[in-house]
Image: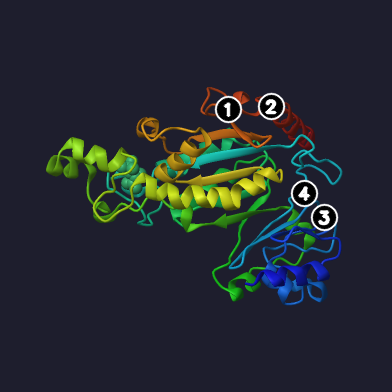
Amino acid sequence: MAATTIHQAVGTLQSCRSNGNSVLCPDYGHVSLRSVSKGFKVDVGLVRGGSYCSKKRGNCVIQASASQATVSDAVSAPSSANSSDSKKKTSEAALILIRHGESMWNEKNLFTGCVDVPLTKKGVEEAVEAGKRISNIPVDMIYTSSLIRAQMTAMLAMTQHRRKKVPTIIHEESEQAGTWSQIFSEETNKQCIPVVTAWQLNERMYGELQGLNKQETADRYGKEQVHEWRRSYDIPPPNGESLEMCADRAVAYFKEHIEPQLAGGKNIMIAAHGNSLRSIIMYLDKLTSQEVISLELSTGIPMLYIFKEGKFIRRGSPAAPTEAGVYAYTKTLAQYRQKLDNMVQ
Ligand SMILES: O=C(O)[C@@H](CO)OP(=O)(O)O
């Protein structure tokens, strides 16, 4: 989509400001450039992602490049119209990372990679447990891979969230899919959390190891060789991706799509995979290619970062003995928890 479309959008969406590549529209919610180019002003039904853009809902950033455009929904404050606990006077945003719960191939000890298998019963329970641990942390947007085990994990985790917003998958695979998944109630839309699925967050592609048993592969090729395939930074498994290759797409996606949302104050949850998350953590924690080798992520354990003043601050694993250790990490999170407490009284 040509960048000129954006400028047409600026003309249509009054009170938008453009810096050339992006447009800030304080008076509008979730719009897509495609809908804008089709005449957003006269037909709110063209607004995708389930939001109306006719009422004041905070900031809406339209990010666009010459070839594509994505939109971030301005998520309303979680508790009431006048509260702004997930808005960012404090310029702080929470980032939750969750590796999916145990999958049916984790259980069988098979290399999985990009094969799309579901969670086991234990994986379902882990996802629910993860959800309990983050139930007091604000979540404005969710990113998952395109694989069902990550999507199940995100959805199951959100069943436990105290705010009770409904995670709603954004369908952008075709224009029709976008149009057919619209929501026609602004009120309902306010109670939704957009879920963006991205293949770039998929598990590292394991090449010819996919479907093989890990133990049998170690017996056949030797423990060291298999460890090198599984954990080295730049050595790919046969016809697969190394962690470095996986990082190239996962971290690029994170920087291009997720980091700007955090900078805009959105609280984000990412449900993804052992290796795509290892590569993102490597970026967040500035790990070296040596250090990342020993980084192992358990299934279903959420990790929390605070994004503040352009920096990621790791708050330890919320796998702490009680969830009290999670929300109390910052004043903003404690305030959010307080608001949730007040809501149920
Ligand atoms: O099989 C896989 O896709 C991954 C994650 O389960 O395995 P590994 O731990 O070897 O990277």
Dividing the picture into quadrants, the one containing residue 147 is bottom left
| Labelled pair 1, 2 in contact (Cβ < 8 Å) | yes
| Mark earlier in primary sequence (2, 4) | 4
Q: Is residue 171 left or right of residue 247?
A: right
Query: Which numbered tag is attached to residue 315?
Result: 1
Closest to the camera, between mark 3 and mark 1, is 3
Closest to the camera, between mark 4 and mark 1, is 1
Q: Residue 240 at what x, y percent from top left?
A: 30, 54
Q: Is residue 344 left or right of residue 101?
A: right
| Labelled pair 2, 4 in contact (Cβ < 8 Å) | no
- Read off the residue under disc 2: 330
Q: Residue 277 at what x, y percent from top left?
A: 46, 42
Q: Residues within 10 Å of mark 1 (few under 14, many from 20)?
A: some
Amino acid type, label 4? Ser
Q: Residues within 10 Å of mark 2 (few under 14, many from 20)?
A: some
Query: Which numbered tag is attached to residue 26?
Result: 3
Closest to the camera, between mark 2 and mark 4, is 2
- Read off the residue under disc 4: 76
Amino acid type, label 2? Thr
Amino acid type, label 3? Pro
Closest to the camera, between mark 2 and mark 3, is 3
